[in-house]
Amino acid sequence: MVYYSKKDYKLLGFMKSERTNKKYKAVIQNKKTDQIKYIHFGQLPYEHYRDLTGLNLYPKLQHNDDYRRELYINRHKKFLKKNHYSPEYFSTYYLWS
């Protein structure tokens, strides 16, 4: 998995992913070089807890089930790296929080 340090990158926003199996892509920018990176996240056609990207492109996939949310977070928290952006970071904090 690819990790990008929050110290080196800033989040610019979200867009719909053009990849057939992903929901969104996060747009991040290197603070020193201004280089843009895209991080695709959110597996289609699976449901998610809640969409906090601001785009809400998949309202029918939102389930709001607290028990499923808890199971997801427990299963995926091992992939999070403190102070870093990654696909898992965006899925956890923007689709499952």
Image: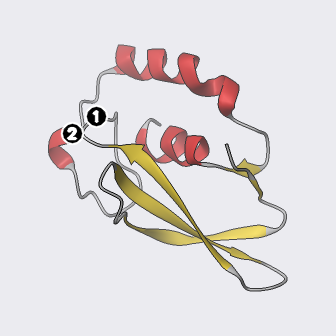
Where disc 1 sits, the SS reads loop
- N-terminal of the pair, mark 1 or mark 2, is 1
Q: Which mark is residue 37?
A: none
Image-based side of 64 in relation to 14, left or right? left
Residue 68 occupies which quadrant of the picture? top left
Task: Report the amino acid beneath label 1.
Answer: Tyr
Task: Report the amino acid beneath label 2.
Answer: Leu
> Which residue lies under the disc numbered 2?
61
Q: Residue at x 49, y 42 (%)?
A: 91
Q: Is residue 49 above or below residue 16?
A: above
The extreme front residue here reads 20
Between the C-alphas of marks 1 and 2, the distance is 7 Å
Q: Is residue 32 above or below residue 95?
A: below
Task: Looking at the picture, tell me which residue is in the foreground, 21 or 27.
Answer: 21
Where disc 2 sits, the SS reads helix
Image-based side of 7 in relation to 50, left or right? right
Counting labels gives: 2
Which scheme is used to colour this image of the protein?
secondary structure
Mark closer to the observer (1, 2): 1
The extreme bottom residue here reads 34
Q: Position of residue 72 (x, y in %)?
A: 47, 22
Q: Is residue 75 above or below residue 79?
A: above
Q: Residue at x 83, y 68 (%)?
A: 8
Q: Position of residue 90 (x, y in %)?
A: 54, 48
Task: Looking at the picture, tell me which residue is in the foreground, 75 or 20.
Answer: 20
Residue 74 occupies which quadrant of the picture? top right
- CB under 8 Å between callouts 1 and 2? yes
> Which residue lies under the disc numbered 1?
46
Q: Residues within 10 Å of mark 2 (few under 14, many from 20)?
A: some
Q: Residue at x 33, y 35 (%)?
A: 48
The N terminus - image quarter: top right
